[in-house]
Amino acid sequence: MPSLILGSHPLAAWSGRTLVIGVTGSDPATATASEELPKPTAKHLDQVLPLLEVSTKVGATTTLPAVPGLKADKVVLVGLGTDEGGSDVLRRAAGAAVRAAGKGSVALALPHADATELAAIAEGAVAGGYAFTEHKSAPATADDREITVFSSLDRKDAPKDVLATAETVARNVAWARDLVNTAPNLLFPQSFAEQVQQVAKASSGKLTVKVLDDKALVEGGFGGIVGVGQGSSRPPRIVTLSYTPRSKKVPHIALVGKGITFDSGGVCIKPSAGMLTMKSDMAGAAAVAATVVAAAELGLPVAVTGYLCLAENMPGDNAQRPGDVVTMRNGTTVEIIDTDAEGRMVLADGMALAAESGPDQILDVATLTGACVVALGPKIFGVMGNDDDLRTAITEASDRADEPSWPLPLPVDLRSGLDSFVADLAHKGDRWGGALTAGLFLQEFAKDAEGEPIPWAHLDIAGPSFNEGSPWGHVPKGGTGVAVGTMLEHIASLG
């Protein structure tokens, strides 16, 4: 992974492959670092920007070789829009610029007013350089280049600490992306659990890992995840990943992640085209694992426990059937309606287990419903919950992390669609409001032993968790690592 370095010397003295400079305004574009640039460089840019009709659209890039007055081999001009607006613009522009820069060292001279904007530049730069090459036949060279971020912030703003934090966040987001991108014949419940154990052991954070195997899940009454996993030769697991700060008088938040390492749909099998990206159906668990590790490494003053609900949904000869009735961890009986709506079943068991520890809040994260993608598109995730303040806090955290979200309701009148003639609950309603009825089902498991609600929010990341199109801004093709930033922002706010 690249290392972040704080740039303190003049831009003219930096000697490396690519220097990134922002451009803004319109007709013609102007360079934002003009006051810091050597006079020959500023003059050259004033001449060529109008001639090249350089775009200032956010993330648009133009490469200039051998710019006078600079030791850098080339300059990448990146658009910041017409008003240099905000950390989201800077994050996306930094990512696009580093991607355009290609191999070799990179330095970024982008305008920023405070530590938040500096962090956005640093996180975007590392994210933009991400590439997944684990399955290539030729050995990949590790990306250990230096990314220099120039800043004029005073010491009171602790720019070095800002970059160190950004590097920790970016490294764990990259791990979440790696997990999502790994082929499903290589990442399955047991190998996922083993990787979490390895990462936790190597981490600088204070982490504890516990794994419930298939026998323990049966004995523990986890009928939801056992039922989902029983059609696969690779049995399910629940991994508990915990971080506890030194102080005991801190909030405790539980994070529950859907970890379907491959979703064929079970006996209600998907069409072949619908299975192509189903290795990404564990993106919620990946995000939870990365968030807990990052929180521990950052030393956030909040106790965080992650529950990774890992299973493979396959149509084997012992697979679950529509009409089956299972008993969940909290004793609720559930009638199975559609085996391709398996995510809520593994999450519900995980939430029931999380509730037993008495957390102050529960967040669940899941690639749960296509209905949410239909409603919000591929770049926005939905947020539901039983607590308006918590739901608002999550959407605000997602804004700060530049991970767009939108609050969705849990309409009481849809709850009757989950009534079952033979069990306590049907696990799926009718086709209308599918994302909302999934949330209503999960709400039944956000309760303590006395049946009192625990503040809970549900993040349906089915759209933005996997980018099937071209890279854009700081977001790569494939796994995106979405929700890690949102959850870290929210956890930090609790502390």
Image (cartoon, rainbow, N blue to C red):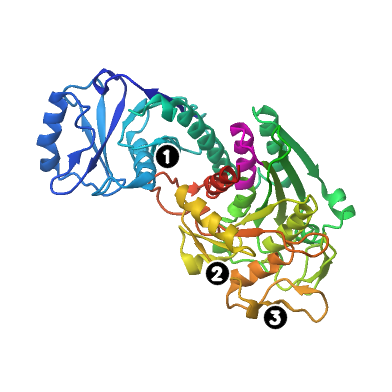
For label 2, the residue is: 371
> Against 85, is 332 above or below?
below
**Disc 1 crowd, CA 10 A, few/some/many (<14, 14-19, 20+):** some
Mark 3 or 2, which is nearer the eye?
A: 3
User: In the rendering, which numbered label is found on residue 252?
Assistant: none
Query: Main structural element of the magenta stretch: helix, strand or loop?
Result: helix
- Mark 3 to mark 2 CA distance (whole Å): 19 Å
- Residue 178's x, y, as percent? 56, 41
* Marks 2/1: CA–CA distance: 34 Å
On the image, the x and y values in percent for residue 2 come to 46, 28
Judged from the image, the secondary structure of the residue bearing numbered disc 3 is helix
Indicate whether residue 282 is drawn in magenta.
no
Q: Earlier in the sequence, mark 2 or mark 1?
A: 1
Identify the mark at residue 416; answer none if there is no mark: 3
When the figure is inspected, residue 336 is found, relative to residue 198, above or below; the finding is below
Q: Amino acid at mark 1?
A: Thr
| Residue 136 visible (yes or no) | no
Magenta-tinted stretch: 287-302
197 displayed left or right of 24: right
Which residue was labeled with disc 1? 116
Give the amino acid at mark 3: Ser
Q: Is residue 464 visible?
A: yes
Q: Are discs 3 and 2 less than 8 Å apart at CB?
A: no
Q: Residue at x 66, y 64 (%)?
A: 265
Taking the spot 56% from the left edge, 66% from the top edge, the residue there is 370
Residue at 24%, 20% (x, y): give it.
12
